[in-house]
Image (spheres, rainbow, N blue to C red):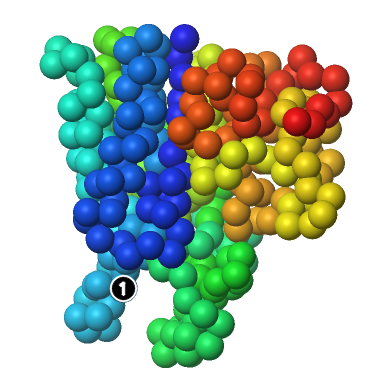
Amino acid sequence: MRIVVALGGNALQERGAPMTVQNQRANVAKACAALAPIAQEHQLVISHGNGPQVGLLALQAAAYDHTSEYPFDVLGAQTEGMIGYMIEQELGNRLPFEKSIATILTMTEVDPADPAFTDPTKFVGPVYDADEARRLAVLRGWVVKPDGDHWRRVVPSPMPQRIFELSTIKTLVEADTVVICAGGGGIPTMYQPGSRKLIGVDAVIDKDRASAVLARDLKADSLVIATDADAVYTGWGTPEQRAIMLVHPDTLANFDFPAGSMGPKVEAAIDFARNTGRDAFIGSLTELPALLDGTAGTRVSVTANGVAYR
């Protein structure tokens, strides 16, 4: 099978934990322990989030002086290399020496007229309490929003249109190479209106939406969206919360999920299932084999009859 696994930024960096290299390596190692058996049996493409990492790089650049602030397309490229390096190394330590692994710097096209540019929703960087978040918003001109019990910075998250390096990725996958790509949703790029000049965009593309586009265009058999939640829940945080086991994409589209967290994952799963007729899975990376056989997490399938709960 050809499987695209999208690793959440918070699956690589535990929520609220210090963003040290040691912590990130430890989390990448856990992720690769789950990915290695899949890589030995299937064609594997790995995408990953970068919200915590790109936010940290932005803070580091801004701390130097105001003229040193880097746009998010450049920071996205930096995180693709950094996280890709860690995944390559940790996954390579668990696979046969002859197994090829490659990280591809990936550019993703967005529409300059996307309404997301006027309504930032993508969380980046560390978590703050409400007072500190509001102070930083005034100091740095940020937009901040609540993320669970904490507050975080948000930036525009335009919809991905296509992956520019698709042909290269496909060639490598067909050569049995594990490919790490579309990191952080890919480097946001667009054509200048009225021209064919490609430029970077100061935004962060949602990696789940980009992964759905990638999986669709690669004709993947499955899309796995790995997160720090073990499934998709209805009524989350209430006494009536229930874990969805199996659901038709049209049924899932009738539920409401937070735009800054589970919402994009659900939308990506719905889009992939609808556009390809193949299954998408949402759940914990540590349960990856069980996810793929439908005994853990949430399976989104056009063969489902409505919704079934665990």
The C terminus lies in quadrant = top right
Instruction: Please name the residue shown 54% across and 53% down the image.
Output: 158
Instruction: Please name the residue shown 39% across and 18% down the image.
Output: 38
Front in this rendered view, residue 32 or 221: 32
Apparent side of residue 159 relative to residue 244 in the rendered image (left or right): left
Q: Which residue is mark 1?
A: 59
In the rendered image, the residue lying farthest to the left is 97
Apparent side of residue 281 relative to residue 102 in the rendered image (left or right): right
Can residue 309 be seen here? The reply is: yes
Name the residue type under label 1.
Answer: Leu
Front in this rendered view, residue 62 or 26: 26
Image spot of residue 115 (x, y percent): 63, 59
Quarter of image, res 234: top right
Instruction: Please name the residue shown 78% across and 48% down the image.
Output: 241
Above/below status of 300 relative to 51: above
Apparent side of residue 111 relative to residue 104 in the rendered image (left or right): right
